[in-house]
Image (cartoon, rainbow, N blue to C red):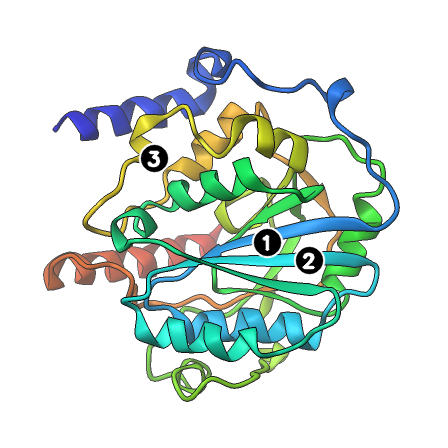
Amino acid sequence: MFDNLRLVFFKFAAKGWIPAKWFEPDFIPESDRQAKTGRLKLEIVSHCWRYSHFLAYQLSSLVQFSPVRMDVTITVFYCPEDEKTSQLLLFFAQQDVPNITWNWRPLPRQKLFRRGIGRNMAALETTADWVWFTDCDLIFRDDCLDTLSDLLQGKQDVLFFPEEERTTDLLTEDNPMLQAGSGEPQILTVNTSNFTARKMSRATGPLQIAHGDICRAVGYCRSIGLYQQPSETWCKAHEDRAFRWLLRSQGEPLPVPGVYRIRHISKGRYTGSQSGNYLRTLLRKFQSWLRQKA
């Protein structure tokens, strides 16, 4: 009950009704952030629990579209109990890709289930110039990372996001794309004609590109105990909105190409009751219908 009250409070606070400085006083002003130029370092931070059939496409895209003008570390938080994800990571660890560093971070599932925990660890420990917090169903194609490097030259803004992403319809588990990702680990590609472009208005959870100096200073919702609390079930990522609130920014858009996301009906990462998962599926369908009508 108390956690639910705290959740309501921070959802209210993240709307801007409460000053962010009350919870994060160590915010670094723009003038004190490095304006890095030249060859930049980017850390991509992803989570995976029973979503190896999506992660396979994300990691494959880094093999097929590895950057030339940027050094990228891909950090994946996972739980060794998830055998399919563990096998997938072992396969990609053996792929030698120019300018890509694989970084696998095992966590107990209780910590993995609260995405803010891993993101906070990565933020505080990063040595990168920029950190892209994402989900494992996002794909980086078509000069995405090199263009991002060009666009970030000399920037001091706290938070950016791609102004456009390309998404699929809500896919069922028997969709050929998802079935292909469920097989033996391999390098996979997508049919881009199955994706439709849509404009973004803010730095949502999988599209948060934050300045490295800010990450090292304030972490990822480090000051909100609720979002650093392990859980026995997968938690909905309410901390995404709180992160933007603490950073005093909804993010600035960048014309980054090649950002693709696989949308899906089934939420395999949830460990709740069958009826609860069914209701989540219905809600996702309804939300998708509303977006199409908007």
User: Which secondary structure lies at badge 1?
Assistant: strand
Query: Could you say which disc has been placed on residue 228 in the image?
Result: 3
Q: Position of residue 150 (x, y in %)?
A: 84, 51
Q: In the rendered image, which residue does mark 1 sit on?
A: 44
Amino acid type, label 3: Gln
Circles 2 and 3, Cβ within 8 Å, touching? The answer is no
Q: Is residue 137 visible?
A: yes
Task: Tell me the crowding category of disc 3: few under 14, some 14 to 19, or many 20 or more residues within 10 angstroms, Cα based.
Answer: many
Query: Could you say which disc has been placed on residue 72 in the image?
Result: 2
Task: Tell me the crowding category of disc 1: few under 14, some 14 to 19, or many 20 or more residues within 10 angstroms, Cα based.
Answer: many
How far apart are the alpha carbons under marks 1 and 3?
20 Å
Amino acid type, label 2: Val
> Looking at the image, is mark 2 or mark 3 earlier in the sequence?
2
Vertical arrangement, residue 89 with respect to residue 152, above or below: below
Vertical arrangement, residue 42 with respect to residue 103, above or below: above
Total residue callouts: 3
